[in-house]
Amino acid sequence: MWASSTANALRVSCPTRIPLSLPFSLSRCFSTVLEELKYASSHEWVKLEGSVATIGITDHAQDHLGEVVFAEVPEAGGSVTQGSSFGAVESVKATSDVNSPISGDIVEVNTKLTESPGLINSSPYEDGWMIKVKPSNPSELGSLMGPKEYTKHCEEEDASH
């Protein structure tokens, strides 16, 4: 009861819908790491479906950012390079660049984020995705972390702060 009241007072919440079809593990309180995704050390995630990769920021990242009030996404038709910034998210705490975990051509952007940037907070792995990319070098996915490595990375990063 105390934890629930405190979470409400701090406006911290867990996702109300976690897809039952997706395996997941909890990396720490209020932060979800999905099994089928790849992760960058800069806290972006990638989900490859066929020849298209969906990219967004992780639950861990949105949790640390706080309430997202603005999201900058690029235009479809452009390209991204692994490790380079393609957009930004602004929260009540800070503005952060969003880096692409892979290189490729942008085939779609999440235009819903213009009107509802809070989707990044409420649904970082579903409705809050940022861009979809056709990878130009699919082998780059091999340089990203799996869920166990990413969980360890977050725990070590949090412990050092």
Image (tube, grey):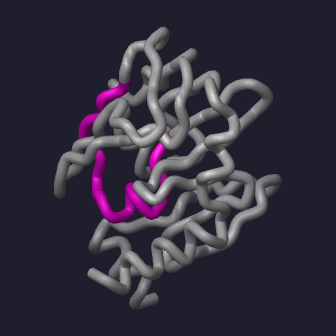
Q: Residue at x 28, y 71 (%)?
A: 10
152 shown above or below 31: below
In the image, is 121 to the left or to the right of 151?
Answer: left
Classify the position of the C terminus by image quarter.
bottom left
Give the magenta range: 56-73
Q: Residue at x 17, y 57 (%)?
A: 93
Residue 73 percent across, percent down from the top left? 36, 26
Total numbered circles: 0
In the image, is 6 to the left or to the right of 32?
Answer: left
Closer to the camera in the image, 88 or 110: 88
Residue 20 percent across, percent down from the top left? 78, 57
101 shown above or below 134: below
Residue 139 percent across, percent down from the top left? 69, 40
In the image, is 123 to the left or to the right of 92?
Answer: right
Q: Residue at x 18, y 53 (%)?
A: 94
Closer to the camera in the image, 74 or 18: 74
In the image, is 95 to the left or to the right of 75?
Answer: left
Residue 99 percent across, percent down from the top left? 39, 41
Outermost residue to the top: 77
